[in-house]
Amino acid sequence: MGSIVLFGPPGAGKGTQAHRIMEQTGLPQVSTGDMLRAAVKEGTPIGLDAKSYMDRGALVPDEVILGLIRERIQQPDAAEGVMFDGFPRTIPQAEALSELTEITHVLAIEVPDERIVDRICGRSSCGACGAVYHDTFNPVPTTGCACGQFVEKRRVDDNAETVQNRLAAYHEQTTPLAKWYESRGLFHRVDGDRDIDEISSDLLKLLE
Ligand code: AP5
């Protein structure tokens, strides 16, 4: 199997679905957002540079992202392919990726803009296992996170103002990728404005 791309606006459910697809297919999730947040937390030069872009909801420059990806896909667990989450986000990123690995599916999770703010502003995740929750739509089970502990994490960019910038960046810089991948016969759309389980089931069917 080659690599797959999860595509969609901020808050579409890419991370939520990546977690489930990873359990079913064994493909490791490669999230550039998670990699950047780890770099910010560690205070590396990449993290220090990226933070100002992320805090205002702008895209981090392509060469920074591509440096992270080149290093990540050389890891042994990436040998059979990976699941990219939040990457590529620009045509130059997609062009560079096509030189690095074969992409077999681009799975687009489509959600209208008006749903996005509520989704993002209620998000939390488990710092121990990475599972994604929502205060209303997908609460942490009363029995706790499936991993046995729940270490609550909230993102600094999950606020109504930054979300508007992230959406604008998505429409201006990322949506042109849909045509780019469509013209290569790789693009599949799934309605993301539904129950989380129904979306997972459709995504897994597309990968069969
Ligand atoms: P990144 O971390 O990639 O954030 P994003 O694309 O904005 O996506 P999110 O993680 O916010 O959303 P998601 O689709 O994963 O949704 P989730 O499953 O959590 O990027 C952050 C920043 O890093 C960017 O702004 C940029 O600065 C930089 N960056 C990263 N990659 C880059 C790149 N390649 N190039 C340049 N810059 C880059 O779900 C959201 C919420 O909704 C959760 O609470 C969840 O429980 C809930 N939910 C999920 N599905 C449903 C459903 N079906 N119904 C109801 N609620 C749902």
Image (cartoon, grey):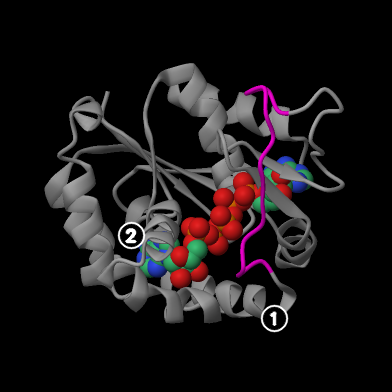
Give residue 175's position: percent from left, percent from top. 47, 66
Position of residue 169 relative to residue 69, above or below, is below
Residue type highlighted by circle 1: Glu
**Magenta-drawn stretch, dominant element (helix, strand or loop):** loop
Which of 112 and 149 lies nearest the eye of the viewer? Answer: 149
Disc 2 crowd, CA 10 A, few/some/many (<14, 14-19, 20+): some
The quarter of the image that holds ligand 1 is bottom right
Helix, strand or loop under label 2: helix
**Residue depicted at x 33% and y 59%:** 180
Disc 1 crowd, CA 10 A, few/some/many (<14, 14-19, 20+): few
Position of residue 71 relative to residue 205, above or below, is below
Q: Which residue is mark 2?
A: 180
Whichever of labels 1 and 2 marks the residue nearer the N terminus, that label is: 1
How many labels, in total? 2
Mark whose residue sits in front, 1 or 2 = 1
Q: Quadrant of the N terminus?
A: top left
Residue type highlighted by circle 2: Trp
Position of residue 103 relative to residue 148, above or below, is below
Q: CA gap, disc 1 to disc 2?
A: 30 Å
**Residue depicted at x 59% and y 80%:** 165
The image's mark for residue 161 is 1
Q: Report the span colored magenta.
A: 145-158
> Is the distance from the Cβ of mark 2 to the nearest ligand 1 atom less than 8 Å?
no
| 1 to the left or right of 57 | left
- Is 156 magenta? The answer is yes
Which of 4 and 131 lies nearest the eye of the viewer? Answer: 131
Residue 92 seen in this snapshot: yes
Residue 89 seen in this snapshot: no
**Residue depicted at x 53% and y 77%:** 55
Label 1 with label 2: CB-CB less than 8 Å: no
Give residue 177's position: percent from left, percent from top. 38, 62
